[in-house]
Image (cartoon, rainbow, N blue to C red):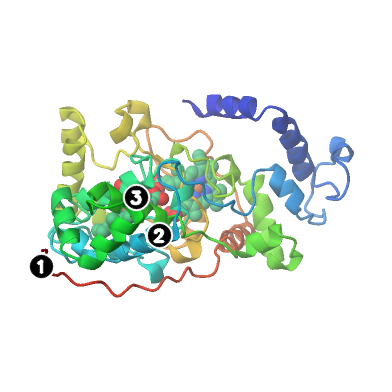
Amino acid sequence: MPVRFRWIALVTAAGITAVVIVIAVALVNGGGDASAPPGAAASPAPSTAADPFVALTPFQLRVLSFDVLEPVELPEDNPFTEAKSELGRFLFFDPRLSANSAVSCASCHQPDRGWADALPLNFGYAGSVHWRNTPTVINSAYHPKLGWDGKALRLDIQAQGAMKGALAQNMDPVLVEERLRQIPEYVRRFAEVFGPGGPWFEDASRALAVFQSTLVSRNAPFDRFMEGDDLALSESAQRGLKLFTTTAGCSACHRGRLFTDEDFHALGVPAPDDFSDDPVRQITFRYQLRSRGAPEEVYRTATDDPGLYLVTKSQTDIGQFRTPMLRELGYTAPYMHNGAFETLEQVIAFYDAGGGVSPNLDPLLRPLGLSDRDKQDLVAFLQSLTGDPIVVVAPELPPYEVFK
Ligand code: HEC
Ligand code: HEC
């Protein structure tokens, strides 16, 4: 859907709330007295450099859709239990879910690296390489779509894809079950959670989903600010937040509690050399095009990751990627689907230049003309969305025993 229609749809759906948002935006843009009632912003004076800075209040931010996270809602057919989550923790760290028994979910989603891997592009299953940047699994239970192109719609389905995928754990589901059945402690734990007869592959993915739903970002300075601690955000971060929601236009796409519209856009992020020049990476790229049904012509001529196109096969989706959440960025560099940017400063410079080159470049991108201070302020704000590290102890894995 073209972006302006999306906006229309959004505003219509928001109904009465939209009116409130318009008033709040007028308040924000007018730079009026933050404590004045909305009507008082009706005659804003043109802002000049001499205007004193007026910070946004938690109330205004809530009207603009930003807030602390609500508790996770799990699908009805896979509710939370403590025992299921604990089983999921074991499985997340267990390399026996991979064909060569060498790579677990935690090998790529590393707890001490923001539950990602700190690499521009992931290393992939032994003997191959992955073609994309590893996203964190923190807050993944909130996303309606997962992966850079939104391929998976549920955490348990994503986990099945990770176990089976040739680039991740390269594993046969029946072999997963046989391995788990030769580990008495798993047989006992699966029986306790899912009933006797297993372990089953699908149940393993359910437990993994429930464990991941416990990895939720809290305690970011931004959250403390929203809960009433005025000093939690530096003045620079507050200026950055205001730019983010107004002149820099970031909140057109990065909105809501996770700072994402959960939609897709083409920014024209350039492919790094590591993507274009490494033959092993190119094997992965061509393999993705072919195995996901790209027509012969696209398979032969494409030079870059087509993103959402692989899911929809629509030309206008080429180069579109899911808007990532902006929480926990302090742990998850490098950034973008291809890890093209090492630092947040580089990300901001990219947006300041109006984005990159793409046939479907999003019309919301334009040169921003940010000052050096504006850029620093935006970075300070983005950093304020990172909370305390989420520490989970790796379990001591139960051994195999001959099944009787
Ligand atoms: C070899 C590295 C690797 C392994 C092993 C791996 N992943 Fe991933 N994971 C990735 C990469 C790379 C992506 C991005 C894939 C894409 O967008 O195409 C990803 C995406 C995800 C996402 C989507 C996150 C989001 O916000 O979009 C989730 C959830 C996830 N993995 C969970 C798991 C689980 C659970 C396991 C174990 C069963 C696992 N992963 C194993 C590398 C890995
Ligand atoms: C048109 C929608 C849109 C606008 C406007 C936008 N973004 Fe983004 N943002 C995205 C998408 C889509 C991606 C992922 C692109 C990719 O990987 O190719 C992204 C990626 C990012 C990332 C990297 C996150 C990660 O985990 O890799 C950061 C940081 C970011 N944006 C910040 C900003 C800031 C700051 C602004 C305002 C200056 C902004 N964005 C404006 C859609 C947008």
Q: Is residue 232 left or right of residue 268?
A: right
Check disc 3 and report the residue beneath it: 206
| Quadrant placement of the C terminus | bottom left
> Which is more toward the observer, 351 or 327?
327
Q: Are marks 3 and 2 in contact (CB under 8 Å)?
A: no
Element assignment for label 3: helix
Q: Is residue 359 left or right of residue 30?
A: left
Give the x, y percent position of residue 230.
Answer: 75, 64
Element assignment for label 1: loop
Amino acid found under the numbered disc labelled 3 = Arg
- The mark nearer the N terminus, 2 or 1, is 2
Give the x, y percent position of residue 347.
Answer: 47, 55
Confirm whether residue 350 shows in the render.
Answer: no
Give the x, y percent position of residue 126.
Answer: 15, 61
Give the x, y percent position of residue 338.
Answer: 33, 52
For label 2, the crowd category at 10 Å Cα-Cα, with few meaning under 14, some 14 to 19 and many 20 or more, is many
The quadrant where residue 134 appears: bottom left
Disc 2 versus disc 1: nearer the observer: 1
Check disc 2 and report the residue beneath it: 85
Check disc 1 and report the residue beneath it: 402
Rounded to the nearest whole Å, what is the CA distance between mark 1 and mark 3? 26 Å
Identified at 66% across, 54% down, the residue is 241
- The mark nearer the N terminus, 1 or 3, is 3
> Which is more toward the observer, 179 or 189?
189
Whether ligand 1 has any atom under 8 Å from the Cβ at mark 2 is answered as no
Amino acid found under the numbered disc labelled 1 = Val
Q: Is residue 344 above or below residue 159?
A: below
Rounded to the nearest whole Å, what is the CA distance between mark 3 and mark 2? 9 Å
Rounded to the nearest whole Å, what is the CA distance between mark 2 and mark 1? 26 Å
